[in-house]
Each structure stands twice: as structure tokens, then as C-alpha cells.
Amino acid sequence: MPEEMEKSDRSSMAADRLDLLVFGATGLTGKHAIPFIHEIASSRSLTWGIAGRSAKKMRELLQQKETELGRDLSRIPVIVADITNEESLLAMAKKSKVLLNCCGPFRSLGRPVVEACIKAGTHQVDVNGEPQYMEKLQLEKHEDTERKGVYILSACGLDSIPCELAILHLQKEFDGVLNSVVTYFEEEQEGKRLPGCAANYTTWASSITASSNWGELNNLRKKLFRTKMPDLQPKLRKRILPFRNDLVDGWMVPMPGPDHSVIERTQRYFYETKGKRPIQVECFYAEKSLWNVLVLAVLFLLFCILCRFEFGRRMLLNYPEIFSYGTFVKDEVPTQEKLDNTVFRLTLCGEGWTNAGGRIDRNTQYKEPCNGRIVSQVSGRNPWYGATALCVVAAGVIVATESNKMPSRGGVYTPGVAFADTSMRQLLDQNGLTFEILCKKAI
């Protein structure tokens, strides 16, 4: 009886809430999210609003977007909330069914928002790309969110939705058992190379925070992952030194960022709960110039060393243009023209066994080498903000409309786990993030 009353109370509260609410709307990702949320939410009769610290800035933003889109946004709700004020965060969370959190760095700013959402019974999706934060959240909050029936989903931006969904797409399209997937990310500017930074300073600050606490991961994972994963063969080769291949033009180097850790968590979930054989994954970044590869390698090594010390972190924060090779500049954001002229491609090469006979379980080993290959590609424009904004909006829409196709009744999950059985990939494909199979062949 009490449980039925609680469900009734939640339904009553939900009826008065917005379907979707963008928190951090005046930030770079939040600004890019407004056209997508207006278009997608309107087509599905979903209500939406924006939230942040300054009502004045948010109204000015809506007026600007109204002019750009040629749509009336005067009735879009504006909710004031401050990340340093718990009461305002809780009040904000109670006004929405799904909160789209675009406020980072998440290690310092994400936790209060999540706790407010859990208390309010509100789902949260975010654009966080910090492995320590995500895995600690899963360790400490998964049971609470399950009990509350709340979904907390991180890495719902360019990190790591395209990679997660593309791997699921490969697995679905491959006629057999997929053993491994190697991903190659490349980006380039169309036309004349434009001056200025390529990404927002907040992203740089987040990477410093994540890297300075990288040592926490080993102990954290010992507590979080109690089941040992199988040592499946053939083992995917780990590559550290730059190399070339016949799929992508340029020099391949290990891809920084959370994709690998997020994918591993997804594969672990399918292994432990669905009895599926895990897919081995390695992620690489394509750089056209070998000289750039060498410079970036030196800067990356220096970055890792400086992140270990307080004075080093201050240097990184104060002089980002030096240590990021001009990608980030303090107190400067990339121009819209530069963002719009940047295109990206994520190429994935999967290998496995076609027409694999017999019973396949999560520990099945194969004596023969892989005999089949499948290659796919995800492509789009304005990767770090436009594509990220589309991904987080689509994630919020799917949570709002297809939660019956998601696992359990709530929890802290990766995008691959949360959206495996939904129409998420199709929604992205319809809105400018293209998924396609390039080839299938024997090897």
C-alpha cells in the first residue's frame, strides 16, 4: 500500500513538471542544445525549459535564438538555480522529469545536481567525460537510484554516445560473433583554416581535474568491479606508438578521453547481466602530420607530469594555449564559424567469426582466427558542441519517451547500456549524426 501511494504521488508531481530542462543553458553546449531541443521536443509534444544562474542572460539567450530560428520562444520557462545553493537545485529538479546537465567540471559541480535529482525523483543526463566521477557515482549511487526509480546517465555527449551506439550497431549488423572493435576519430576544418581556439576553456579545466585524480581509478575499480572479466582470444593488440592503416588517412595515436572506460563498463554490464561475450575495444585519434604527433606527445607527457603537482596544475590552467598547442585559450571561446566548419568522422573496424555455429556464451573461446570484418562510420559537424548538444538532447528525449525500453527501473548506467534497445541511434541519424555501414568482408 505505501509503495502504491508513493507511485501515485510521483505521478501527480510528474504531471506538473516540464518534460525536459536544460541546466547550464547559457554555456556553449547549452546554447547549442536549444535549437535541437526546440525541434525534437516540439515534434513529440514535449515541454521544455532552461535553467541557470542569471534570468537576464537566459532571457537574452532565448531572444537571440528566437531570431535565429524564426520561432516564438517567449513562453519557454526560465528557472533560476545556482550550483552552490542546494535548495535552488532541489527546487529546479522538482520542476522537470528529465534534467539535461551541461555544467562542468563535473567532479566539482556534478554531485550536488545528481543528489538533488535523486531527492526529487528526476532523471538526469549529462555531458560529463570524467571517468573517476562516473565510476564513483556508479559505485555510490546506483542502489539509491534503483530504489528511487531514477536514471542517472553520464557521457551523453560526443563522449561517448557515437562510439557506444556505433559498436552496438556493428554488433547488430555483423553476421556472427564480434571479437574486437578498433575506433579511429578524425576531425578537420573545411575550407580556409580559421584562427582562434578550437574548444572551450571549461573542457580544458575538466581534463586537468580528471587527470590529476587518475590514480584514484585503480582502488575505485577494485570496489566497483568484483567480477573478473574473461581473458578472451585472440587478444586485441594494444598500440602506443604512432602507426598508419588503410582505413583512415593520417597517423594513429591513442585517443584521450573516456570512451574506452565507458565502453568497458558497458561490455561488463552485458557480460554480467545478459551473459554476452564481451567485445574488446581500442580507441585511436588520427593526426595528419607526424610533426604534430611528436609535438602533442611531448605536450601530453608534460601535461601528465604537471597534473601531479599544485603548481603544475596552476601553470596548465593559466597557460592553456601553450600546453594544448593552441586548442584552448583562457577567457576565449571558439567562433561559431570555426565550430560550424569543423567536421568529424568516427570509423570503426570490427572483426570476428561469421556464421559461428554452436552455443555461444559469455566465455566461449575460438581456436581459429577471425574470418570476418565489418567497417562502419559515424559522421557529423561541430563535434565538441553541436554534436554533443544533439546527443544530450536526444538522450533526454529518449529517457522521457522510451524508459520502458531501458534497463531495470532506474540506476547509474552508461549510454550503451541505457539506450541499447531504444530508437536513440535512429533519432540521431534523423538530426545530422549519420551512422552507416561501409563494408562487410571476409578476412
Image: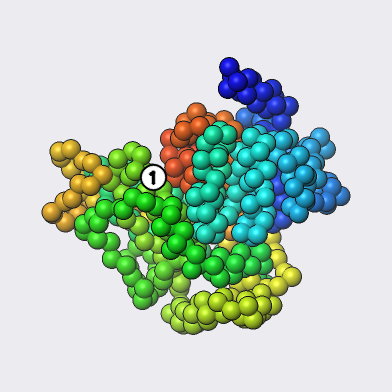
Q: Quadrant of the N terminus?
A: top right
Circle 1 SS class: helix
- Residue for point 64% across, 81% down: 311
* Relative vertical location of residue 224 with respect to residue 48 in this rendering, above or below: below
The quadrant in which residue 360 appears is top left
Q: Position of residue 222 (x, y in %)?
A: 41, 57
Q: Residue at x 61, y 80 (%)?
A: 312
Point 53% across, 49% down: residue: 140
Query: Residue farthest to the left?
Result: 367
Instruction: Name, please, the residue furthest toward the top.
Output: 1
Relative placement, left or right, of 286 versus 195 is left
Occupied quadrant, residue 356: top left
In the rendered image, the vertical position of residue 121 relative to residue 442, given as above or below: above
How far across and how far down the image is residue 321, in percent? 64, 77
**Residue drawn 18% across the image and 50% down it:** 365
Judging depth in this view, the residue of 209 and 182 nearest the camera is: 209
Residue 370 seen in the current view: yes
Specify the amino acid type for callout 1.
Tyr
State the residue lying farthest toward the right: 56
Seen from the viewer's position, the closer of residues 104 and 216 is 216
Which of 311/78 is in front?
311
Towards the viewer: 115 or 83: 115
Q: Dot 1 surroundings within 10 Å: few (below 14), some, or many (20 or more)? A: some
Q: Quadrant of the C terminus?
A: bottom left
The percent position of residue 362, horizontal first and vertical second, equals: 26, 44
Query: Can I make out residue 186 in this image?
Result: no
Left or right of residue 406: residue 85: right
Judging by the rendered image, the residue that carries numbered circle 1 is: 269
Q: Position of residue 297 (x, y in %)?
A: 47, 79
